[in-house]
Amino acid sequence: MDLKGLTVKKFNKGLVAGNFSACEAVEEFFNSIEEKDKKIDAYLSLNKDFALNQAEDTDRKIAKKEKINLMAGIPMAVKDNILIEGLPATSASKILENYRASYDATVIKKLKNAGAVFLGKTNMDEFAMGSSTENSGFKITKNPHDLTRVPGGSSGGSAAAVAADLAVVALGSDTGGSIRQPAAFCGVVGLKPTYGAVSRYGAMAMASSLDQIGSFGKTVEDAAILFKEISGHDDLDSTSAAASYGEELINPDFENIKKLKIGIPEEYFAPTFQSESRPDGVGIDGLDNEVGKNIEAVINDFKKSGFEIKKISLPHTKYALSCYYIIMPAEASTNLSRYDGIRYGIRSEEKTLLDMYKKSRSKGFGEEVKRRIILGTFVLSAGYYDAYYAKAQKVRSLILIKNDFDEAFKQVDVILTPVSPTLPFKIGEKISDPLSMYLSDIFTIPVNLAGVPAVSIPVKNPTTALPVGFQLIGRHFKEADILGLGQYYEQSII
Ligand code: GLN
């Protein structure tokens, strides 16, 4: 069985044709994990018996000639902040080291019903805070394309698992870029759905007004298949929407796709990609020439294929990062207050209750998580609430969402941008400089603030040895537009 290039549809075909059984596939993947994951460290925990049990169900159905779901038997990976009943769920934090989930997340329930097989839980930045997976409390995942470099983050384990053929598809979460940036760094596809399109019930909350669960695949089609399976309204998540998606996610009508107008935010693509060439205060610093050149090649490919390309403006992107680093820590500091040594996770036995709280949290949380709890508590404190949190919320809703994206989507259907301003960086390169790490998400964060969907797609034949990703951003609930355009790029542009 060749795991390389194995997509959902290829797997399904082979399974139905009897070329292999679902249980054999599990064995194959575990062999591959055994061989390769010592070096990559994509997985935090593995669950072979559990996976074999799930696979047996599908094999039984096939033996009885029952119709199976496209996701049946598919060996997949799950980020460790998503709950699977009975299995470890640590969010890569020491504070949850021995915690096991007591129920299934809604996405897991749906995938279990579809027959998908969970091989294991993947490494991540602790509580999804980071862009390199170096903030994991347990280990650092390496980029399968170059083991000295980071896979991106925070869903670095899921992206690396798919890239290294240690899973066919994977689940991740994206609060500011955590699916799209690691997808770009590892050369796979990553989708952050519209806010509300996928239930977050059973996902450990980081910043609840921004968090979304989404999909990784080797192809846009695979990311679309997984997304279709997990999307839909859920009574258990009050933010989940009633949107429903049809077959066009997976089988787009390219005649319609060819009519989509593509917008290029001019501030993101100054002519030489150098800061001197940009008008004062408008452009975005730090876009690597190498990344810029590759994104430009993608734009030219679309042009050559006859797409209408239009310059647009997202002038307030420069405020997005500041806005995000107030709202996100504020919400995270509140969400993380539940890890107190009493309800979950490790407890430091101290003489007084206050000491017990303090020591449990000091020992259990890593540096980055503590930094954000302190930041968040500060911006929410009585004297500073209006100056920081309330102001950031206004900037978010009045300027970033209402003006920038609404105006842009009056003129175009899809927006094309880079995913990350840099290529995958070296392990250790940015870890002691939080600001440069935060800047990794400059192109992805505005999307979360606006709640719109976006997908990261690998540039074909990049000029670099390392993968580069481009981002397609769509209107609310128009995943079909970005996934359709992505599939067009994959299949029709050489
Ligand atoms: N890298 C960003 C951060 O550190 C985004 C994280 C995420 O999307 N979970 O907050």
Image: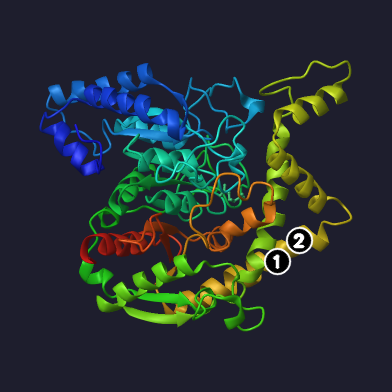
Residue 487 point in image, percent of width and height: 27, 59
**Quadrant where the image shows the N terminus:** top left
Q: Secondary structure at mark 2?
A: helix
Which residue is depicted at the point 80% across and 15% down?
349
Residue under the image location 74 percent in, 44 percent down: 371
Q: Residue at x 62, y 84 (%)?
A: 279
Task: Give the spatial CA distance, label 1 vs label 2.
Answer: 6 Å
* Residue under pointer 2: 390
Question: 354 or 119, which lies in front?
Answer: 119
Q: How is the image coloured?
A: rainbow
Could you say which quadrant of the image residue 344 lies in? top right
| Residue type highlighted by circle 1 | Lys
The picture places residue 49, in percent across and down from the top left corner, at 36, 16
Give the left or right position of residue 113, taking residue 392 as reference: left
* Cβ–Cβ under 8 Å for marks 1 and 2: yes
Res 234 visible:
no
Q: Is residue 408 visible from the viewing direction of this image?
A: yes
Left or right: residue 137 compared with residue 87: right
Residue nearer the viewer, 213 or 114: 213
The residue nearer to you, when weighing 475 against 131, is 131
